Amino acid sequence: MRGNILGERFIVLSFGESHGRCVGVVVDGCPAGLRLGEEDVQRELDLRKPSSSLISTERREEDRVEILSGVFEGYTTGAPICMLAWNKDVRSEDYERIRYTPRPSHADYYAYVKYRGFNDYRGGGRFSGRVTAGFVMAGAIAKKLLREVLGVEVVGYSLEIGGIRAENVSLEKAREYRYRNDVRAPDPGSAERMRNAITEARGRGDSVGGIVECVAAGVPTGLGEPVFDCLDSDLAKALLSIPGARGVEFGAGFRAARMLGSQHNDPFAVRDGKVVLEKNDAGGIVGGISTGASIVVRVAFKPPSSIRVEQKTVDLRSMREVGLRVPGRHDPCIVPRAVPVVEAMTAIVLADHAIRAGLIPPVLGEKGLRS
């Protein structure tokens, strides 16, 4: 089974549980010769941490990455890279109280059935957003690889939260503002309105969902392996593997279903002797192959299911219907913290396909003999 493995050439193996000893990842297939230190990974991992405001969980994990293998004298060696972060701020007693009363719209009950009670139920175990820390670790390597070898930039941001949608978004504004506010919005105005939507829901003991938009600029033409390893289908698989993700669309997305062909088609043009597209309703992928235009993908996230509003569930011991108010520390909206995760998963898939296409070699440069 490959349930915890992503990729064909740039391979990511995820491990760890929410309240286990650690969470982490093994990356196999990263070329030798990439300059890499823990600070490169830590920089990305810090972006995933909850803010100190009222819009995120009170759980405060240090999330200090440790690279255990695959890096020597500041460079990747070509060997598997193992990285982890220890779980320190856990309160498993909150989950002992609801062990036999599964949370509605969470994986609790379904994991209990599938694994016949052997699953780690604390904090959601493998089904917790906590495991995405490992995704971001792997994504940090993929982003650096794409940037330094191919000049590809991956930029994500909160496009919509609680029905509040950012307007007139540009890559330049998103690049500047997304990590300068705690909701990861692409501009200051929408950031304040999104923040209010989250705090109002939290005040009622409820939660809100939203949409992360991600743009990958500078992607070369030709990535993707049709028909079953299309670039968009692989991206969709990776992005839908993020806990809480409920939908993925590219370019015009579902809006294309309401357009005419003459409206949706992206006309070709010639600029400086090169074939280019006059617009990008395809979102940078046609026929499962990258077009050379920026890849534009959006991921819809549901409202977190762990809320303080009383919900209806069952007691698995008595098989009776009961009420449930979920205890513990939970995000009222996962969208802001999902932004670096979406960037990471996008970069992982792009790096994998770039290696498969031969655009990233197995060894970068030459270190030379020691004297």
Image (tube, helix red, strand yellow):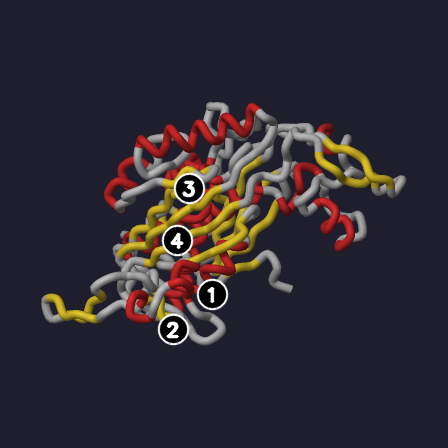
Q: Residue at x 66, y 41 (%)?
A: 124
- For the residues marked 4 and 1, what is the alpha-carbon distance in whole angstroms? 19 Å
Q: Nearer the viewer, mark 4 or mark 2?
A: 2
The amino acid pointed to by label 1 is: Ser
* Residue 236 visible (yes or no): yes
Q: Dots 3 and 4: beta carbons under 8 Å?
A: no
Q: Nearer the viewer, mark 1 or mark 3?
A: 3
Q: Residue at x 43, y 43 (%)?
A: 339
The amino acid pointed to by label 3 is: Glu
- For the residues marked 1 and 3, what is the alpha-carbon distance in whole angstroms? 23 Å
Q: Position of residue 330 (x, y in %)?
A: 59, 32
Q: Nearer the viewer, residue 107 or 258?
A: 258
**Residue beneath disc 1:** 233
- Of all residues, the one furthest to the bottom in this rendering is 227
**Residue beneath disc 3:** 160
Q: Position of residue 121 (x, y in %)?
A: 72, 41
Q: Nearer the viewer, mark 3 or mark 2?
A: 3
**Residue beneath disc 2:** 287
Return the disc, 1 or 2, that comes first in the chain's sequence.
Answer: 1
Return the disc, 3 or 4, that comes first in the chain's sequence.
Answer: 4
Dot 3: few (<14), some (14–19), or many (≥20) neighbours within 10 Å?
many
In which quadrant will I find the N terminus?
A: bottom right
- For the residues marked 1 and 2, what is the alpha-carbon distance in whole angstroms? 10 Å
- For the residues marked 4 and 2, what is the alpha-carbon distance in whole angstroms? 24 Å
**Residue 263 horizontal side relative to residue 327, left or right:** left
| Quarter of the view holding residue 59 | top right
What is the secondary structure assignment of the residue under circle 2?
loop
As drawn, the label of residue 294 is none
**Residue beneath disc 4:** 142
Q: Residue at x 76, y 34 (%)?
A: 98
